[in-house]
């Protein structure tokens, strides 16, 4: 019985980690859109993450390609560059532009 539990946990643990990572990336994408909406007085709505790159130095730097709908319902891709520090919950939108 114990061997079965260990095997099951080894199978499920990576899946749980992937889901948490995906949730963090989606949270960053929503943050990027909300920041851009406030800065530019637009009304973009998150659709999906098209592409993601991550770079780790002392902070994590994300380069996301995000699909979002504008006020007219048109979907466009945008490039967002964000910086995140996990230890103090710091997030910053460095760049946001239409592709």
Image (cartoon, helix red, strand yellow):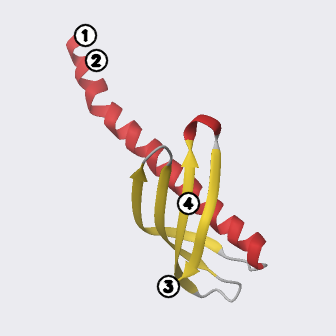
**Mark 2 surroundings: few (<14), some (14-19) or many (≥20) residues within 10 A:** few
Front residue (pair 73, 44): 44
User: Label 3 to label 4, Cα distance in Å?
Assistant: 16 Å
Residue found at x 35% / y 40%: 15
User: Label 1 to label 2, Cα distance in Å?
Assistant: 5 Å
Which residue matches tag 4? 82
**Lower sequence index among marks 4 and 2:** 2
- Helix, strand or loop status at disc 3: loop
Mark 3 vs mark 1, foreground winner is 3
* Disc assigned to residue 5: 2
Q: On the rendered structure, is 19 left or right of 74?
A: left
Residue 52, compared with residue 22, is above or below; it is below
Which residue matches tag 3? 99
Which residue matches tag 1? 2
Mark 1 vs mark 4, foreground winner is 4
**Mark 4 surroundings: few (<14), some (14-19) or many (≥20) residues within 10 A:** many
Query: Looking at the picture, how far across and down is residue 90, in whole percent?
Result: 64, 46
Front residue (pair 35, 59): 59
Q: On the rendered structure, is 45 left or right of 14?
A: right
**Lower sequence index among marks 3 and 4:** 4
Residue found at x 20% / y 14%: 3
């Amino acid at each position: 019985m114990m061997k079965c539990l260990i095997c099951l946990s080894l199978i499920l643990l990576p899946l749980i980690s992937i889901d948490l990572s995906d949730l963090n990336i989606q949270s960053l994408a929503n943050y990027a859109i909300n920041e851009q909406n406030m800065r530019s007085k637009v009304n973009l709505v998150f659709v999906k993450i098209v592409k993601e790159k991550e770079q780790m130095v002392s902070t994590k730097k994300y380069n996301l390609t995000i699909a979002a709908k504008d006020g007219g319902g048109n979907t466009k891709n945008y490039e967002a560059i964000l910086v995140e520090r996990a230890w103090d919950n710091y997030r910053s939108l460095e760049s946001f532009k239409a592709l």
